[in-house]
Amino acid sequence: MTDTARARKLADRIRVVVAETLQRRIKDPRLGYVTITDTRVTGDLREATVFYTVYGDDEERAASAAALESAKGVLRSEVGRQTGVRFTPSLTFVPDALPENARTIDDLLARARASDAQVRQASSGATYAGEPDPYRKPVSEEDAEDIGDAEDTGDAGGRADGEDA
């Protein structure tokens, strides 16, 4: 097995070579506005996966995917020429799911903001349930005497001293 640092360096170099070659040498009219987002190379340096995004609708994505597949041989030979490795890795082009994931997250955040706004609007005129000060306070001596007097007269528990429950 090779060093993962070497695989990372080769992946970065492949990303740059493929992007520059697409920009300068490939003149396919089907190729839309393609951005190479990432490249990953296997540990044995035999296969490279190139992730890309295409700006546009589904037709332009499909046309760009076909253009990349047809230009795969030119891109691989250019990668081999510029990297100088013994075995030029085979290239596989995969559409990057990052833009769709970002769009999904943006939609979820928008729904959360709308829900927060509804809660904020519903709670704007609301008041707290119960007393304004719900915490128990220590009983002062005067209040304790009043409670003691009420117990002596039988008013404290709601029944007289002699009654059973």
Image (cartoon, helix red, strand yellow):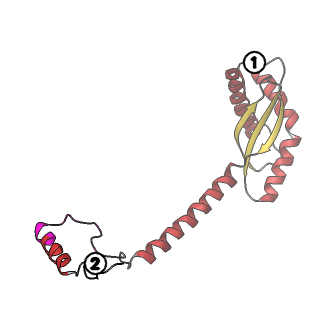
Residue 95, which numbered label?
none
Q: Give the residues drawn in magenta, as a range.
A: 130-144
Left or right position of 9 against 155 = right
Left or right position of 115 against 28 = left
Magenta stretch contains residue 49: no
Q: If the image is split into quadrants, where does the N terminus sit?
A: top right
Magenta stretch contains residue 137: yes
Q: Amino acid at mark 2?
A: Gly
Q: How many numbered discs, if any?
A: 2
Helix, strand or loop status at disc 1: loop
Residue 136, placed above or below residue 14 = below
Residue 61, placed above or below residue 45 = below
Residue 27, placed above or below residue 87 = below
Question: Which residue is identified by label 2?
Answer: 157
Q: Residue at x 38, y 78 (%)?
A: 126
Q: Amino acid at mark 1?
A: Thr
Question: Which residue is identified by label 1?
Answer: 2
User: What is the CA distance from the residue labelled 1 to the residue labelled 2?
Assistant: 85 Å
